[in-house]
Image (tube, rainbow, N blue to C red):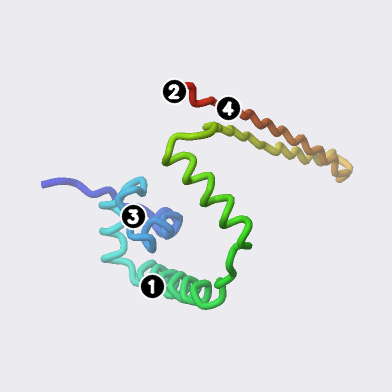
Amino acid sequence: MSYIEEIPCFEVLSSVVFIIEGAVEEARNPQAIASHLDSCLACRSEVAHEQEMHSLLQEVLRRTCDEKAPADLQHSIHEALLRQVTGSGVTEVVTQFSMTEISIEIDEFGNVEHSEIQIEQTHVQHFLDEEK
């Protein structure tokens, strides 16, 4: 007989994204989450509400997000994909890194000191096809 750890409501609700996306197996303790939901009406109700809101939002987005990309963008994407498939041109690898560090300090007089540091780095590497 296996033991299933009991977990509090806040741990179950912190995994609600996994639950509504149908990926509860990716959560930290899926068996404990399932067991908790079986026995906790409040959490079951909250998950049902979140699933309903998620479905509603997806339906609204499906109906309203019908913009089309400009023809020149579609053409350039098509050309880039075609070059990749046919092996012609240049292969490009772009690595981007961005981080923002925010520090907020409050002294004993209640004065707030705020500092923000933003670090961004982009590295582009081109590989030419030499087989031609």
- The residue at which mark 3 appears reads as 23
Tell me what residue is drawn at x 49 percent, y 41 percent. 83
Q: Nearer the viewer, residue 116 or 124?
A: 124
Disc 3 is placed on an element classified as loop
- The residue at which mark 4 appears reads as 126
The quarter of the displayed image where residue 119 is located: top right
Label 4 crowd (10 A; few <14 / some 14-19 / many >=20): few
Label 1 crowd (10 A; few <14 / some 14-19 / many >=20): some
The amino acid type found where label 2 is placed reads: Glu
The nearer-to-camera label among 1 and 3 is 3
Label 3 crowd (10 A; few <14 / some 14-19 / many >=20): few
Tell me what residue is drawn at x 71 percent, y 37 percent. 101
- Label 1 – label 3 distance at C-alpha: 15 Å
- The residue at which mark 1 appears reads as 48
The nearer-to-camera label among 4 and 1 is 4
- The residue at which mark 2 appears reads as 131
